[in-house]
Amino acid sequence: MRVVMKFGGTGVDSCQNLINVSELVTNYKRDNGYEIVVVVSAVRGVTDSLLNLTDSINKHENVSIQDFLVNLRRIHIKIIEDCIHSKKLHDLAEEKITDILGELKEVLGGIVILRDVTPKSLDYLLSFGERLSASLVSFALQDKGESTECLTGKEVGIVTDSNFGTAKPLMDTTRLRVRHRIERLLETKKIPVITGFIGSDQNDNVTTLGRGGSDYTATIIAASINADETWLWTDVDGLMTADPKIANDAQVLKEISFSEAMEMALFGAKYMHPRALEPVIEIGIPVRIRNTMNPSNLGTMISQNPSDRSKKIVKSVSAIRQTGLIDVGGTAMANAPGTAAKIFDVLAKKDINIIMISQSPSESSISMVLRKNDIEKAVSILELSLLGRVIRKVEVNSNVSVIAVVGSGMRGIQGVAARVFSAVARENVNVIMIAQGSSQLNLAFVVSDNDCETAVRALHREFDLGKPEPDCDA
């Protein structure tokens, strides 16, 4: 069996967690005879630290590169000292970390002089977190007696477009390059250890796949080498029927479809990159989400055709918080072709993403849900570009949440919407805005953020999601 295993930042942020990761990999390789490819995220907190540093540079604030690098070195060397028992490997690992940090120091020095962090240079900077953590995992596996080769996403052959920060893979080229490189390593019984999150464009510039992009890396590689499964190891047992911090009887979903998982990811479900399933859907490679701290649990299986026993009308209730609602309107919008295009175009030019849209039948108003930190910028650009010409008013509600009810069983079933809105109405929750996709896999609506948790719990009860699912086969 050929498996791509991705490990998140919490899986490599301490000696004990790194030992757990290395033991999981070696046990599946030795005891089960699996061919394994490992994909690694940065140590927890490192990517955020790099982002905070570059944010300070952009604001022309004084930063101490030396203090930053000393702390970064301390984090990684401490893990090496605690985990790598072989003196030779310990010295090699420390030398590797020192070399990577030396390169990082040079890059940061140049950026501080210029006082400008471009999207291109930011991607290069952010790649260092994964380069450091992949080295840790590679040496930890060697300390267990395994033969490994540590590669960046660029080195393994992931080729992307030049959309720095949210690059997309050029799959035809990537598939050929990745397959050639990894097949050669697997034939020699080596374990490839690959940096998540990182690729390179056709001009050989380092690119990143967006936050959480290590999941995406894992499925890109799985599709390229025709893996049997992809396992996304995290610190939870799998995808859940709701956020357990809101619904204390939330259950792990043992089986869901690709389409359901994509809807959940797009509507705020944690522990999976929204685009991570794209490379494996067409060829049907299953994806499991599993817990490194609870490896006996098979987690959530995401596949093309889940078993009948897992089918429910509704699978989960998700919430996207920290959002705001902008209403734009005016009689001039009615029967005016291109109005919506103009509104969306000015927002897109400022890299403002719209989460959800609704338009009145009269065509005289459009409502848009955005991330809260984009609201001020969006209102400003709408007023400067369109107010008084295309639109007559801009109204804002900066304290809302999006609730999404997801499930393939909703398709074609009458009365689901009535149950949803009756359940929230019984809790005196006012629905501000509604949208349903044509796939009928989700029903999303907007409520005041103060009502968010009440609405989620009400829907969780209404569709009996606190009841455990029957066991599914491994």
Image (cartoon, helix red, strand yellow):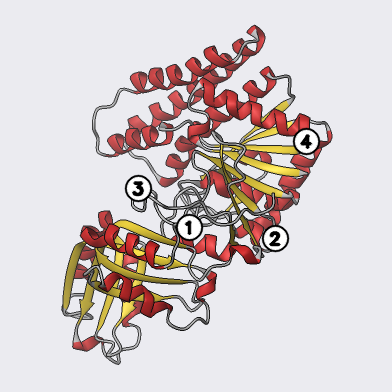
Which callout, 1 or 4, points at the residue further toward the start of the chain?
A: 4
Q: x, y percentage for residue 87?
A: 63, 7
**Type of amino acid at the residue the image marks with label 3:** Lys
Q: CA distance from mark 4 to mark 3?
A: 36 Å
Give residue 85's position: percent from left, percent from top: 62, 11
Q: What is the quadrant of residue 233 in the picture?
A: top right
Mark sitting earlier along the chain (2/4): 4
From this viewpoint, is residue 201 visible?
A: no
- In the shown orientation, is residue 392 left or right of residue 317? left
Mark 4 surroundings: few (<14), some (14-19) or many (≥20) residues within 10 A: few
Residue, disc 3: 245
Q: Amino acid at mark 1?
A: Lys
* Residue in front for this viewpoint, 317 or 106: 317
Q: Which residue is mark 4?
A: 32
Q: Which residue is mark 1?
A: 467
Q: Nearer the viewer, mark 2 or mark 1?
A: 1
**Camera-nearest label, 1 or 4:** 1
